Image (cartoon, rainbow, N blue to C red):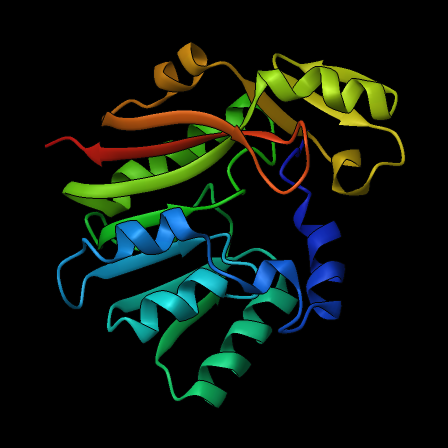
Amino acid sequence: MTTDTAYLYWNAEWQKADGSSPWAQPEPWVTDHMATLAPRSRVLDLGAGIGRHALAFARAGHQVTALDAAEAAVAAISASAFTQGLTIDACIGAMTDLPFESGSFDHVLAWNVIYHGDETIVRRTLAEVARVLRPGGSFMATMLSARRLPVEQAKAKGREISRNTWVFEGFGDKVHPHYFCTAQELVSLLWGFETMTLFDRPHEKPGSWHWHLLAERLA
């Protein structure tokens, strides 16, 4: 069963998004870390959406690759990069099978991406991130916290289709599988990484708990 299907929902959303969208503004935690990277670092924005972070990395002078499974996302990034005179390699692809050589990147960002699927999808994606990231490279990501699950259950009828993986009836992209985890479960998935920072906080809405992870690729 294929569970990494949420890009179908987001492809329609990205067709409607513009510069006024909340998804157009880069996250402060991302830009703070961006400032610590070496000049012209090789950066992969995994699940880049309409490019809020890819564009920011490119404006900061880094060598940026943006990958998304949604065609509308890649088209939006390419158009914005052209308009702003930026160079971004934007491509369509699956997070479970990254079309890059091992050790290709100094930094990988996966903001609100990897939890779109079951545990098999999560494990495959993290293994791919570890493969394409050079030893000592940094990895920043968010994951859905198990603390958020009761909040979602109060909004809509849900069912667990496999371990920690839930779908919710008639509820935005959550009609597609989403993976929720505890800190211990998340760290156990991070083979090949040293966890540097891990904290849980809501995003734009009360109860929207996400794990925020910064890790380093082990040699």
Q: Residue at x 68, y 38 (%)?
A: 205
Q: Quadrant of the N terminus?
A: top right
Q: Position of residue 77 (x, y in %)?
A: 52, 73
> Is residue 30 placed above or below 1 in the rendered structure?
below
State which quadrant residue 179 falls in: top right
Q: Position of residue 73 (x, y in %)?
A: 59, 65
> Is residue 179 placed above or below 217 in the rendered structure?
above
Left or right: residue 73 compared with residue 102: right
> Is residue 109 placed above or below 75 in the rendered structure?
above
Q: Residue at x 56, y 59 (%)?
A: 49
Left or right: residue 92 compared with residue 71: left
Q: Residue at x 22, y 48 (%)?
A: 102
Q: Quadrant of the C terminus?
A: top left
Left or right: residue 24 compared with residue 156: left
How many marks do you count on the picture? 0
Residue nearest the viewer, comparing 59 with 173 = 59
Q: Position of residue 129 (x, y in %)?
A: 33, 41
Q: Position of residue 109 (x, y in %)?
A: 37, 48
What residue occupies the far left of the structure in this picture? 219
Q: Residue at x 69, y 54 (%)?
A: 10
Residue nearest the viewer, comparing 126 with 84 = 84
State which quadrant residue 74 falls in: bottom right
Residue nearest the viewer, comparing 23 with 5 = 23
